[in-house]
């Protein structure tokens, strides 16, 4: 890392709010002075009466290393020879009125003591040798808008822990997390804040060390290794960044030199009563230099690919989270924070000037316009925005019992009223699985089977919806309990219980299908990439639409059934004549579904439907999403779930026992048995009641039914063998699965052990 002098020019830029590399000037830097090697300390503290550097190198004696006020009268500096890397230090600040010294950590410190200790550590950031040059060269050739973005959101302290319940280090995460993310086919990792913070329960959102990657998991170079490893495996790294507020801990930024400095003099602007924190003063130019330099620091010194800016609404609105009397309108009588607006525009323009390929993602929860549009167009300058409206609507919709969904159909369709007004990311984030909101799978109504079916349906709809994607860890395998920041994810679930294992494999296959098909991501922010087939079938709670790549002949047809009822002979209009093939089905048996499929080619008919000349008849599985492609285009994609994927190891707190391994092997998805089509309804098996009532979900077979079904399969197998070499039978005019009329009574072919395991998992999850 470069170290700059405290030159008059650098100081001028700092005070103008345009020194975007202030960290090269301030903080603790290894330098040589008068032939001696040591550390130069520099800190901005304009209100201080005196300051000294104290630490283990001078026995915390405030008299040994006093600092001198610089030429600008606001920045203090001192050179201390002989200091080794790792030395602990703080600034002992005497306020203007005298009295006890204030002990502060370095605002520009690059490393910190491990909690609960709070001092800064001297660290040399110039030693690490990066190996990701090819990654950055490749990024220059691509636009993120036209690439897949499937982000896995991670809390580093609770994704996985050691057998003893301790944190994984950055290097452990580099080996385990990166391997997992790559095998699961995610394209990006988003870390919740990794800046130094004192309290685990803040999840990193209340910061004391903006320039110090938290020491909980290792050193700054260890984190660099993690980023390097991600880039080596083709995975981009995003980090949550919190320029909106900071914590009030005494070693932090609040009243840094005895008076307000990083926060406003105006208590209404400075105090964040709802969160118990302090807001930055965006009108102060030195604070602008501090924050913009910090954003630049993470891009340049840690090679991250993007920042997700937390709580942008808290910055933009003067009245955000405030009661009447706790805020004052701006000079125009409005609610906007004019200084924060100017700061955000300046931040984004600066970042894109130096890093054109950066991802600057706003978590902005209101309808503030043009968040993801360039500043020159009147926007705030971000290139992406989280779609909180879509997330709230869809989670409310998916939480409803299916019988009520037809009266809430607008929650599925309303997002398309504004889907292309911003460059949206569709987030299923950590905020939705804490504080009594339930995990994603627990939000799904119905019994055990229906919960998994609902989550699979939702995920496939989410993947097909325009916009980039983000999923919080644990959702991919259906963790039942809410996220706990102080414990590992429940990795024993996919280890021990078949449905969780199948859910994990489903997520993996769905992610791969997404990455392999341009139609699902190449045109995410324009109507050219999307077209409705039918958005009005609220009675059946079914939606159908088309996703298109830049080449309009490259498209996917998505059909989503949000009820547990099979839809037989369901007609939809399609773009062109010919044959369509079902290329993905969330109801596949390999994923824990009932196995209702549209086998073989689905011929179009000259029947006008949905304002189209051609249409097809489908069997839509219960609580499922299916994807179709025109036969002439199938070669450009791949039927991901029919491929044999590499083994995905799932590790938890401890290594698997031999019994766990055996059960996990038993739980591995088996290849789906394809069913023949038939024009007539299949009669009940001998011994089965003909008037068996319909049930939602997946009913169980009696032992007699199982035996009859087995005998029937053996007979079909023998008949097929005998028929080899004969001419293929004529195709039925209408293709229906043999399961067509009996799918609602689809059997669960499980052993007694599997039934017991499923019940145990359900009980462990707190279900009745």
Image (cartoon, rainbow, N blue to C red):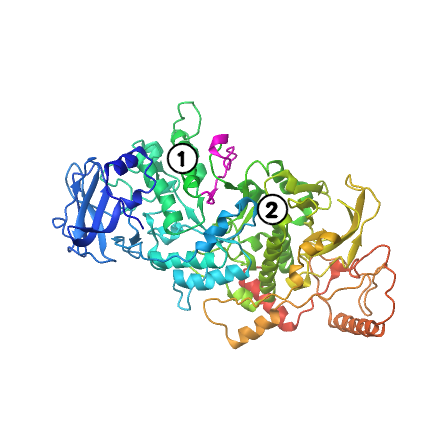
Q: CA distance from mark 1 to mark 2?
A: 29 Å
Where does label 1 land, which residue? 346
> How crowded is the residue under tag 2: few (<14 C-alpha within 10 Å), some, or many (20+)?
many
**Looking at the image, residue 318 lies above or below residue 423:** above
Q: Label 1's element?
A: helix
Q: Is residue 64 left or right of residue 727?
A: left
Q: Is residue 361 magenta?
A: yes
User: Which residue occupies the foreground of this view, 43 or 476?
Assistant: 43
CB atoms at circles 1 and 2 under 8 Å apart? no
Task: Name the one closer to the observer, 27 or 91.
Answer: 27
State the residue at coordinates (52%, 66%): 650
Q: Position of residue 390 (x, y in %)?
A: 57, 42
In the image, 751: left or right of 381?
Answer: right
Q: Residue furthest top?
A: 332
Q: Earlier in the sequence, mark 1 or mark 2?
A: 1
Q: Is residue 456 visible?
A: yes
The residue stretch that appears in magenta:
356-378
Q: Which mark is residue 522?
A: 2
**Image quadrant assignment for residue 702:** bottom right
The residue nearer to you, when weighing 729 against 112, is 729
Q: Position of residue 713 (x, y in %)?
A: 78, 71
């Amino acid at each position: 890392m470069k170290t700059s002098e405290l030159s008059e020019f650098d100081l001028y830029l700092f005070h103008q709010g345009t020194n975007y590399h202030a960290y090269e000037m301030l903080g603790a830097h290894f330098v040589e002075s008068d032939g001696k090697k040591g550390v130069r300390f520099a800190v901005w503290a304009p209100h201080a009466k005196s300051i000294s550097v104290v630490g283990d190198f001078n026995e915390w004696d405030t008299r040994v290393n006093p600092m001198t006020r610089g030429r600008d009268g606001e920045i203090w500096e001192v050179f201390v020879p002989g200091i080794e890397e790792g030395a602990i230090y703080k600034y002992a600040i005497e306020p203007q009125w005298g009295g006890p010294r204030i002990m502060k950590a370095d605002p520009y410190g690059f490393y910190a003591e491990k909690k609960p200790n709070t001092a800064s550590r001297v660290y040399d950031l110039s030693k690490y040798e990066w190996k990701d040059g090819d990654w950055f060269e490749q990024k220059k050739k691509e636009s993120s808008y036209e690439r897949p973005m499937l982000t896995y959101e991670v809390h580093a302290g609770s994704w996985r822990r050691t057998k003893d319940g301790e944190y994984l280090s950055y290097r452990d995460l580099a080996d385990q997390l990166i391997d997992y993310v790559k095998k699961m086919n995610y394209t990006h990792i988003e870390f919740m804040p990794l800046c130094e913070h004192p309290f685990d329960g803040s999840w990193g959102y209340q910061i004391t060390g903006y320039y110090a990657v938290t020491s909980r998991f290792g050193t700054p170079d260890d984190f660099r290794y993690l980023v390097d490893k991600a880039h080596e495996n083709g995975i981009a790294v995003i980090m949550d960044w919190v320029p909106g507020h900071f914590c009030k801990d005494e070693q932090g930024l609040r009243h840094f030199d005895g008076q307000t400095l990083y926060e406003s003099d105006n208590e209404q602007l400075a105090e964040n009563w709802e969160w118990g924190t302090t807001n930055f003063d965006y009108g102060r130019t030195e604070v602008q230099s501090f924050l913009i330099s910090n954003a630049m620091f993470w891009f340049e010194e840690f090679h991250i690919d993007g920042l997700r800016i937390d709580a942008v609404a808290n910055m933009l609105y003067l009245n955000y989270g405030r009661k009447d009397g706790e805020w004052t309108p701006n000079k125009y009588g409005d609610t906007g924070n004019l200084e924060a607006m100017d700061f955000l525009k300046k931040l984004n323009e600066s970042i894109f000037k130096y890093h054109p390929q950066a991802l600057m993602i706003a978590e902005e929860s209101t309808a503030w316009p043009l968040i993801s549009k360039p500043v020159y167009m009147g926007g705030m300058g971000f290139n992406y925005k989280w779609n909180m409206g879509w997330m709230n609507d869809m989670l409310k919709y998916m939480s409803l019992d299916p019988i009520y969904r037809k009266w809430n159909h607008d929650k599925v369709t309303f997002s398309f009223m504004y889907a292309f007004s911003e460059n949206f990311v569709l987030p299923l984030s950590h905020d939705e699985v804490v504080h009594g909101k339930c995990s994603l799978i627990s939000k799904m109504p119905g019994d055990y089977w229906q919960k998994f079916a609902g989550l699979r349906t939702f995920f496939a709809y989410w993947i097909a919806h325009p916009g980039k994607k983000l999923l919080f860890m644990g959702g991919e395998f259906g963790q039942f309990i809410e996220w706990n920041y102080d414990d590992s994810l429940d990795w024993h679930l996919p280890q021990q219980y078949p449905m969780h294992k199948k859910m994990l494999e489903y997520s993996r296959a769905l992610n791969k299908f997404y990455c392999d098909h341009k139609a699902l991501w190449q045109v995410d922010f324009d109507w050219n990439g999307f077209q409705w087939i039918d958005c009005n079938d609220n009675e059946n709670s079914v939606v159908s639409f088309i996703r298109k790549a830049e080449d309009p002949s490259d498209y996917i047809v998505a059909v989503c059934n949000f009820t547990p009822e099979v839809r037989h002979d369901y007609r939809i209009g399609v773009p062109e004549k010919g044959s369509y093939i079902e290329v993905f089905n969330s109801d596949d048996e390999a994923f824990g579904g009932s196995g209702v499929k549209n086998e073989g080619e689905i011929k179009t008919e000259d029947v006008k439907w949905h304002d189209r000349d051609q249409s097809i008849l489908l069997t839509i599985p219960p609580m499922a999403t299916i994807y179709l492609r025109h036969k002439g285009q199938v070669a450009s994609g791949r039927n991901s779930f029919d491929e044999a994927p590499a083994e995905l190891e799932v590790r938890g707190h401890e290594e698997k026992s031999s019994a766990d391994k055996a059960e996990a092997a038993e739980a591995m998805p088996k290849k789906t048995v394809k069913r023949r089509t038939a024009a007539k309804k299949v009669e009940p098996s001998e011994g089965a009641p003909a008037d068996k009532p319909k049930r939602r979900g997946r009913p169980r077979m009696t032992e007699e039914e199982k035996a009859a079904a087995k005998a029937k399969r053996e007979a079909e197998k023998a008949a097929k063998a005998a028929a080899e070499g004969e001419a293929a039978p004529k195709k039925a005019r209408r293709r229906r699965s043999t399961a067509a009329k009996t799918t609602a009574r689809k059997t669960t072919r499980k052993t007694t052990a599997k039934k017991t395991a499923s019940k145990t998992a359900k009980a462990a999850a707190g279900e009745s």
